[in-house]
Amino acid sequence: MKNNHHFSKNYIRWTWATLLLIYMVVFAGSFVRITGSGMGCPDWPKCFDQWVPPTEASQLPNNYQEINAEKRQKKLLKFSRFLEYIGLSETSAQLKNDPSIFKEEPFNAKKTWTEYINRLFGFISGNFMLIGFIWLLVKYRDRKLILILGINLILMGFQAWFGSIVVASKLVPWTITVHMLIALIIIALQIYFIHLIDSRQKKTIPFSREVVVLIWVVFVVIFYQ
């Protein structure tokens, strides 16, 4: 693509900052996974129905586990109907018939705040991308770039929504895989977008066929894992 726009240094820096924040979301998500904090906030987008989560169990209602289980059940029923609609009836049945999904975990302040910080990074990165999109729309008005960043912005929104499904399904493995795959696509699109607007990224690095094959093999192995 030949780009006739001269993008300001501030805008280019903003897109790099957005990419950095997206990486921070992935890093924070990995830390959540390692520490087993994925269910630290059993609801979404709030955490224990609060924008700023509690630090002690005494700050929660006595029946908070029953409340969260009921919310989870409603969300999973909606998602199950969606899975049935797109032809994944077996997957839908597995979700609905797994009693462990509806068993609530006790409150753990460390896990709650670990998950909450992960969500904060997601919120900040999403808003950075939104501002970058509006900036592009108002000042540069390049159709191809608007399409690329627009798709990525939609993916960010979908990723946020799907994160609620990951929580509602109590970290069913395939949902985590999809969640990670979407994150990789978002990163790839953001890198491609930067490549198109930043003249410093125009250099082409030659790769041998063996290296390309190795990259794809590594990608498939990681995805399978």
Image (spheres, rainbow, N blue to C red):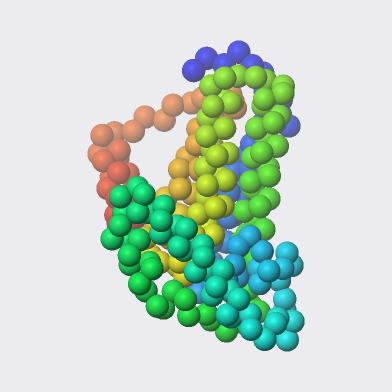
Residue displayed at 58% across by 80% down: 66
Q: Nearer the viewer, residue 28 or 78?
A: 78
Q: Residue 35's x, y, as percent?
A: 52, 74
Residue displayed at 48% across by 80% down: 103
Q: Nearer the viewer, residue 3 or 175?
A: 175
Q: Residue 91's x, y, as percent?
A: 32, 60
Q: Is residue 21 visible?
A: yes
> Relative to residue 212, is residue 225 depicted above or below?
below
Q: Is residue 170 left or right of residue 59?
A: left
Please state, as top left, top right, bottom left or bottom right, where the C terminus lies in the image: bottom left
What is the total number of numbered labels drawn onto the structure image? 0
Residue displayed at 54% across by 60% down: 164
Q: Residue 147's x, y, as percent?
A: 54, 27
Which of the 4 image quarters holds residue 71?
Answer: bottom right
> Relative to residue 143, is residue 121 depicted above or below?
below
Q: Residue 34's x, y, as percent?
A: 49, 71
Q: Is residue 37 visible?
A: no
Q: Nearer the viewer, residue 218 or 59?
A: 59
Residue displayed at 41% across by 78% down: 100
> Relative to residue 20, is residue 108 depicted above or below?
below
Q: Is residue 83 left or right of residue 209?
A: right
Which of the 4 image quarters holds residue 222?
Answer: bottom left
